[in-house]
Structures are given as structure tokens and as C-alpha cells.
Amino acid sequence: QVQLVESGGGLVQAGGSLRLSCAVSGSTFSSRHMGWYRQAPGKQRELVADVTSGGTTTYADSVKGRFSISRDNAKSTVYLQMNSLKPEDTGVYYCNALLGRTLVFFSWGQGTQVTVFS
């Protein structure tokens, strides 16, 4: 059974930084196209950054230039470095393996809460 365990969230002032981690167990991580998703209060979950098995990255326009996604296949972990945080970045952040641009492979983990205050 695949487990996704997100961590690293917290309360941060606008302009600050956080680094999120997602440990994946029970799956062949290195071949997976991985993504970080965000669900803001009252909104649908959205894909904010993804990284292919080959290391190619893609970002939503709202985070481009501020967030950086990376992966460590030896640790089966995907990271999201978030800089210059804004209040609109507030939400619960999840990771998952992409199945196309709109679907995911695995059941969602518990996510990690990020709250940015001004």
C-alpha cells in the first residue's frame, strides 16, 4: 500500500520561506511523475508544481519564480522550496503522482498546512 507523508508546513510571515517534504513508500518512486498540490480554504485543489522522472519541472503561473520542486530518488522524497511567500499561498499542501494533468495515482495523504500572514 502506497503512503504519502507530507511535512514541513507551518506559520510564516509574508516574504518568508518554507521547505516541504513528501516521503513516498510502497511504490517505485523513481519512475513517477510527482507533483505538489495546494488546496486553499474554500477552493479546489490545484497543481502548483511538478517534476518528471527525468527531472523536468513545471510551475503554475502563481508560483513561478518563487517555488522550486526537486526530488531525491534515493530517499523516495519530493521537495517544494517556497520563497517569497504570500498570504494567497495559504492552504493545505499535498503531493501525489500525476496521471495526466488532472488525475493522480494514489489516495491523498494528510497534507501539510501552510499559513502565511501579512
Image (spheres, grey):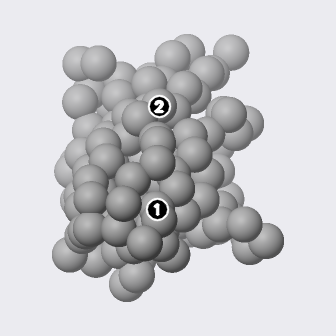
The image position of residue 66, as x and y in percent, is 24, 70
Which element type, helix, strand or loop, lies under badge 1?
strand
Of the two numbered discs 1 and 2 on the same chain, state the one appearing first in sequence.
Answer: 2
Q: Residue at x 24, y 46 (%)?
A: 70
Label 1 Cα neighbours within 10 Å, binned few <14 / some 14-19 / many ≥20: many
The image position of residue 9, as x and y in percent, is 46, 41
Q: Residue at x 56, y 40 (%)?
A: 112
105 sits left or right of 41 in the view: left
Q: Which mark is residue 116?
A: 1
Label 1 – label 2 distance at C-alpha: 16 Å
Q: Residue at x 23, y 30 (%)?
A: 72
Q: Quadrant of residue 43?
A: bottom right
Q: Nearer the viewer, residue 17 or 57?
A: 17
Per the image, the residue denoted by label 2 is 7
Label 2 Cα neighbours within 10 Å, binned few <14 / some 14-19 / many ≥20: some
Badges 1 and 2: C-beta atoms under 8 Å apart? no
The image position of residue 2, as x and y in percent, is 63, 21
Of circles 1 and 2, the one toward us is: 1
